[in-house]
Amino acid sequence: MTTFVDAALSQLRRLGLMQRPGVPDSMRDNSVPPSRDWIAWKPIPSTASDADLDDLEREAGLTFPPLYRDLLQYVHYVQLTETGIRFERHLPQEWGGRLRETYNQYCRDRIVDVGLLPFGSESLMDAGPVCFDTNHRTETGDCPVVFWDHEWIGTAKEVRPMFSSVAKMFECLTVAASNDLGFISHFDDDDPKLIPQKQKLLAEFLRCDPAGAGGPVRDYWTCWGVTPA
């Protein structure tokens, strides 16, 4: 998990994407001059306690996968790089309230109440929340990662898989965060010379999760214009 977060933050720095409005004072990076309302930010050690996380679990009626607890207690961040998943902001003082809003923002009776615990949103087609499927736990407490699609309520496509586990999700996303070329998609006006490199990176991404992204979920990850090499 820490490998992914560190890689994601490094990528944001390389791409010059660590500026946002409304940055808390404790996270401001004063070494970078502000640009109007856009303030440079930096990660800081997380203040999330075990008691804070336990309270959230009690309210949701679900328990976090261990790796997600680790993420929440690692650092505070404004954003992480997006590859299919847009993680919820994790800011001091407000992160708990933000997660509570996420749990109740959508159809709770079709998501949280049936064992799906949201932690972000699907970013390739804005389908809806990305969730931990707590109905299918391993002995270590890990579980699959799925997304809930508001366009398909009441059908077999309402809940769709993304990764076979939280651990595999972080492995795959580390590949994406370690490479600045967006390799999931390719459009008509993109440079065709980039296709071989995109194909190679997508293949590496899929190999990280043969039981999920590279297996049963392969169609989701390969429908955006890039076929893995």
Image: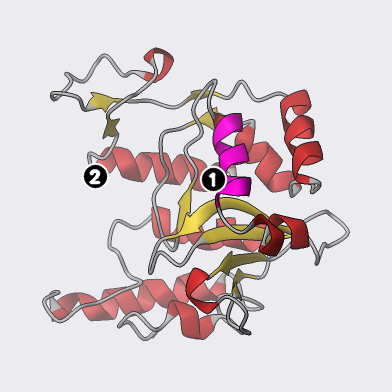
x and y percentages locating residue 99 in the rendered image: 59, 39
Depth order, front residue of 26/199: 26
Q: Which residue is mark 1?
A: 3
x and y percentages locating residue 143 in the rendered image: 74, 61
- Neighbor class of circle 2 (other Cα within 10 Å; few <14, some 14-19, many 20+) is few
| Rendered residue at 74%/50% (across/down) | 65
| Rendered residue at 48%/80% (across/down) | 220
Q: Please tell me whether residue 195 is drawn above or below residue 71 in the rendered image.
A: below
Give the amino acid at mark 2.
Answer: Leu
- Neighbor class of circle 1 (other Cα within 10 Å; few <14, some 14-19, many 20+) is few
Q: Which residues are magenta?
A: 96-105
Disc number placed over residue 15 in the picture, else none: 2
Q: Determine which quarter of the picture holds residue 211.
A: bottom right
Per the image, label 1 sits on a secondary structure element best described as helix
Disc 1 versus disc 2: nearer the observer:
2
x and y percentages locating residue 187 in the rendered image: 20, 78
Q: Determine which quarter of the picture holds residue 179.
A: bottom left
